Image (cartoon, rainbow, N blue to C red):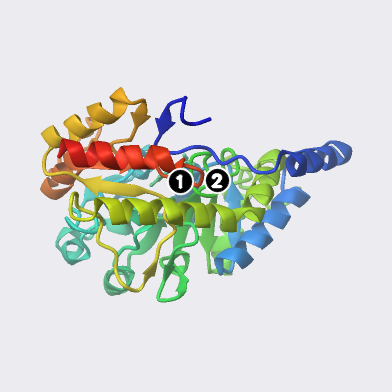
Amino acid sequence: MQNNGPTHVTKTYMPSKEKYQKYVNEIFESSWITNNGPKLQELEKRLANYLGVKNVILVSNGTVALEIAYRTLGIKDFAITTPFSFVATTSSLVTNGIKPIFVDINKDTYNIDAEKIEDSITKNTSAIVPVHVFGNPCDVEKINEIAEKHDLKVVYDAAHAFDVKYKGESVLNYGDISTLSFHATKLFHTIEGGALIINDDELVQKARYLINFGIQNAESIPELGTNAKMNEFEAAMGLCVLDEIENIKQGRKKVVDTYTSELEGYVKFQDIDENVELNNSYFPIVLKSEEELLKVQKALNDENIFPRRYFYPSLDTLDYIEPKQECKVSRDISRKILCLPCYPNLVEDKQKKINQIIRRKL
Ligand SMILES: *Cc1c(COP(=O)(O)O)cnc(C)c1O
């Protein structure tokens, strides 16, 4: 099937239609379609258990999860973050009146360079917002140490880090809050959706008010909230996808193993710490130059194959960023990095073709 149509960088995973229809029937019978419904409650419990975290708070998308995290923690003024991410990491700060201060990335891990964070801290810094880029955990221990020393909040944008483990434990347990995205293109999805992972029970309570207009009960509205609720149809999709998660993971592992063995020595791979268990969400390759990247991209496009330039452009180049900043490493990597098609049912022949084209064009 995919041999004829275009091959994109991701492909939405569609779980059992029969199971989803069964859930839809239940939702119709109950007419409880949103507002902390039974499917949502079940998914929160099952996810917490599966991921090995204390609390999962489901919300309507990953961007709003970041915004709720900042508001839960009272982050203001300036936050240190990475210029090498999806735009939502930065735009969510700016729309909440928080100025992003970019610290450049490590050229091999593509994560914020923890060694450089302290140089950028001032008395107006209230938080660090790092990203586990492509699911590769940041230097969580060093970041933790810096945050404690300077009394800063830490929000990890963990949109890529579903089920990633560091030293045998979920990486989502680091920081004050970690956020996830369950958008259709992510490894685990709920059509649109996201989550906050929070250990502290008081903060959990506050976040739950914030996603529901700040309402505590019929008489009390203790917080300035918004509407960030996930509905029952989305939660039902999540339950269906979660049932098939082992298949998804195995399928991705196979694809990543094939790329790794066939492209080793031809292109540069992301450096992964030996204590990390990845989720194989993405397969980024770094080429020698932007020129070489454009050549490879064109050759693949000619065959109806569409890798993506994740992440491009580097976020420190955005027009709406004030004050102006320049992160040389991030700009350099963003010009040379390409994410190859990576999803569970990528056809083997197609993958062979991708590898051949890349090797031929270098
Ligand atoms: C996908 C993604 C988001 C945004 O999530 P949505 O659910 O699409 O709003 C934020 N940060 C990163 C790093 C992402 O990849």
Asked if the residues shown at circle 1 and circle 2 are in contact, with their CB atoms under 8 angstroms apart, the answer is no
State the residue in front, 154 or 87: 87
The label number, if any, that marks residue 166 in the structure image:
none
For marks 1 and 2, the one nearer the N-term is: 1
Check disc 2 and give the amino acid type.
Answer: Leu
Is 28 on the left-hand or right-hand side of 162? right
- In the rendered image, residue 261, in percent from the top left (x then y), is placed at 30, 56
Is 9 on the left-hand or right-hand side of 32? left
Q: Is residue 277 above or below residue 227?
A: below
Q: Is mark 2 within 8 Å of ligand 1?
A: no
- In the rendered image, residue 196, in percent from the top left (x then y), is placed at 53, 55
Q: Please tell me how crowded label 2 is: few (under 14), some (14-19), or many (20+) other residues with Cα within 10 Å.
A: few
Q: Quadrant of the C terminus?
A: top left
Q: Is residue 53 above or below residue 58?
A: below
Q: Secondary structure at mark 2?
A: loop
Q: Check disc 1 and report the residue beneath it.
A: 67
Check disc 1 and give the amino acid type.
Answer: Glu
- In the rendered image, residue 323, in percent from the top left (x then y), is placed at 17, 40
State the residue in front, 329 or 263: 263
The label number, if any, that marks residue 224 in the structure image:
2
Is 276 on the left-hand or right-hand side of 168? left
Q: Residue at x 53, y 46 (%)?
A: 182
The reply to whether residue 178 is in sight is yes
Q: Secondary structure at mark 1?
A: helix
